[in-house]
Image (tube, rainbow, N blue to C red):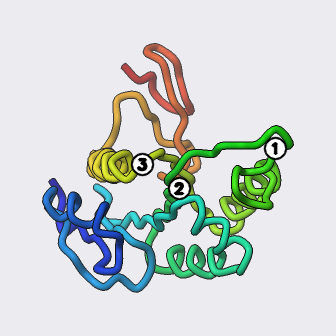
């Protein structure tokens, strides 16, 4: 396990405490809620939001600034969204005045503008597991199922099947 792994001291206890038990060190982070190292020496950072907070932060513009700060602080920014995307019969998120399609388009724009990945979970337990899975994934030097893109950019990967060339030698 690469270390150190950090969880923000302001992160909700339902996520912070299980991550501390898993070896994450509580720390005041300059951006995001969770940081951990990537095998190549870079840092992965996650901004974690429940759907209600996400909607408020999208509306106020705060999410844009949070993701911009995260992008400046770490090499691999990720936005984790927690909750159920329940829709009413008109396509609005239940209990809100936002249509799902408008929210999704805003998230796609943020993903492009802030070079941020999106990951979705349905509960605090799912979010904790997703963080642990991502930390394990990024700790690996190279995955047998992934060949790095010929551009040399390690953030761009192409999945390969055994015996198939993906801009390089076949993966097995």
Q: Distance of mark 3 from mark 2, alpha carbons?
A: 9 Å
Which residue occupies 27% across, 47% down? Answer: 136
* SS assignment at label 2: strand
Most foreground residue, 127 or 40: 127
Which of the 4 quarters of the picture holds residue 32?
A: bottom left
Q: Looking at the image, is mark 1 or mark 3 earlier in the sequence? A: 1
Q: Are marks 3 and 2 in contact (CB under 8 Å)?
A: no
The disc label shown at residue 158, or none = none
Q: How many marks?
A: 3
Q: Distance of mark 2 from mark 1, alpha carbons?
A: 19 Å
| For residue 63, above or below residue 149 | below
* SS assignment at label 3: loop
| For residue 6, above or below residue 133 | below
Q: Where is residue 166 shown, x and y percent of the image?
A: 55, 29
Q: Is residue 152 visible?
A: no
The disc label shown at residue 91, or none = 1
The residue singled out by tag 3 in the image is 123
Which residue occupies 81% across, 43% down? Answer: 91
* SS assignment at label 1: loop
Left or right: 46 in relation to 6: right
Q: Looking at the image, is mark 2 or mark 1 earlier in the sequence? A: 2
The residue singled out by tag 2 in the image is 81
């Amino acid at each position: 396990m690469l270390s150190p792994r950090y969880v923000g001291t302001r992160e909700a206890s339902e996520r912070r405490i299980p991550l501390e038990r898993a070896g994450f060190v509580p720390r005041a982070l300059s951006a995001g809620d969770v940081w951990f190292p990537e095998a190549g020496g870079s840092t992965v950072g996650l901004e974690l939001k429940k759907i209600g907070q996400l909607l408020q932060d999208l509306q106020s513009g705060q999410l844009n600034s949070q993701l911009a700060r995260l992008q400046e602080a770490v090499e691999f920014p990720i936005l984790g969204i927690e909750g159920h995307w329940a829709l009413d019969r008109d396509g609005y998120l239940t209990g809100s005045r936002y249509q799902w399609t408008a929210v999704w388009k805003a998230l796609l724009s943020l993903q492009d503008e802030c070079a941020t990945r999106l990951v979705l979970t349905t509960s605090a337990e799912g979010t904790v597991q997703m963080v642990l899975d991502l930390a394990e994934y990024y700790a690996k030097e190279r995955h047998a199922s992934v060949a790095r893109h010929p551009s040399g950019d390690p953030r761009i990967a192409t999945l390969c099947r055994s015996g198939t060339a993906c801009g390089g030698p076949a993966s097995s």
